[in-house]
Amino acid sequence: MRIAAALWRSSHPGPTVVVTVLALALGASVGVDAGRLAVLVASVLLGQLSIGISNDVIDAPRDRISGRTDKPLARGDAPTRVAWIAAWSTLVGALALSALLGWQLALAHAIFVGSGWAYNAWLKSTVFSAACFVIGFGVFPSLAPLALPDPHAAPPWAWIAGAALGLAVHFSNVLPDLEDDARTGVRGLPHRLGRRASAGVAAGALITGATAVVVGSAGAAAPTVLSWGFFAAVVGVAVWGLVAALTRPPERLVFRLVMAAALLLAAQLVLAGNLGI
């Protein structure tokens, strides 16, 4: 139980739960039946566990150098070998479950999870770090409609919104750890641009994603008042985060504001409700 708890904490449980719940909400919004939806959600959960655990086991030596006592694998709460077994087994399980719903979903999910693994293994320290999030989250809105008996990819505007969401998540997620990362040789695109520029990129991406949802979904049906409300909320919170980044010393407030706007964009994407057309 102690090792299992350590592995769960190493899986980045916050993002893991958020992405899994988002997959559930998108699946329900496009009408995936209960049985297929359960398989979809389980596969996404396993995929997120594999990404999170692999990230922490790869980063464990660097985390020890940085004194990251909040990281279970850096503290030695679980053996490295066990963590690797967990990462690989959840990866295989994720892809196997996806394949039960069709090769199209299996391929899309492999791209999504593979982007996360590529980031963990190498690209996080390169100028191409953001590409993993753009590609992975760009594909993500298609997972739900590809789980239907008659599978379809999401429309182009949903790909844009997903990619924008991924870009914002990447640029905001590294904000609290820029200094620790720099000391241990991690120099992805946000590290090269700096804290304030990264906050600006994240805010711009969120506004772009929110606009794509409103404009794109209007092609099938007029956006609802609630959808417009979420659009306004995303833009408002994103601009607030950008102003905070530009006018005060960098702090966790900027990270929290950008992440709040990202969650609002995810909710707006779910409310659009026509990803399966």
Image (cartoon, rainbow, N blue to C red):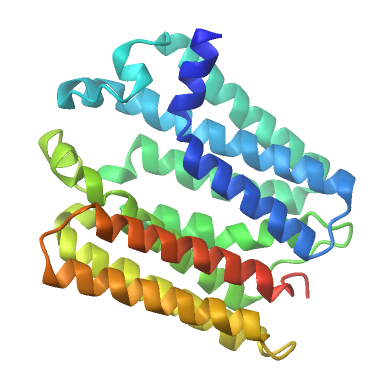
Location of residue 139 by image quarter: bottom right
Total marks in image: 0
Q: Position of residue 169 (x, y in %)?
A: 40, 56
Residue 6 drawn above or below residue 216: above
Location of residue 221 by image quarter: bottom right
Q: Position of residue 194 (x, y in %)?
A: 15, 59
In the rendered view, does 116 fall on the left or right side of 145? left
Query: Which quadrant: the C terminus?
Result: bottom right
User: Nearest the camera: 127 or 51?
Assistant: 51
Location of residue 201 by image quarter: bottom left
State whether residue 127 appears in this view: no
State whether residue 231 appears in this view: yes
Residue 111 drawn above or below residue 198: above
Image point (30%, 22%), residue name? 60
In the rendered view, does 92 fall on the left or right side of 16? right
Q: Position of residue 245 (x, y in %)?
A: 19, 67
Q: Position of residue 66 (x, y in %)?
A: 17, 27
User: Nearest the camera: 158 or 239?
Assistant: 239
Image point (36%, 18%), residue name? 73
Query: Which quadrant: the N terminus?
Result: top right
In the rendered view, does 19 fall on the left or right side of 73? right
Image point (20%, 41%), residue name? 186
User: Nearest the camera: 194 or 265?
Assistant: 265
Image point (79%, 40%), residue name? 39
In the rendered view, does 133 fall on the left or right side of 60? right
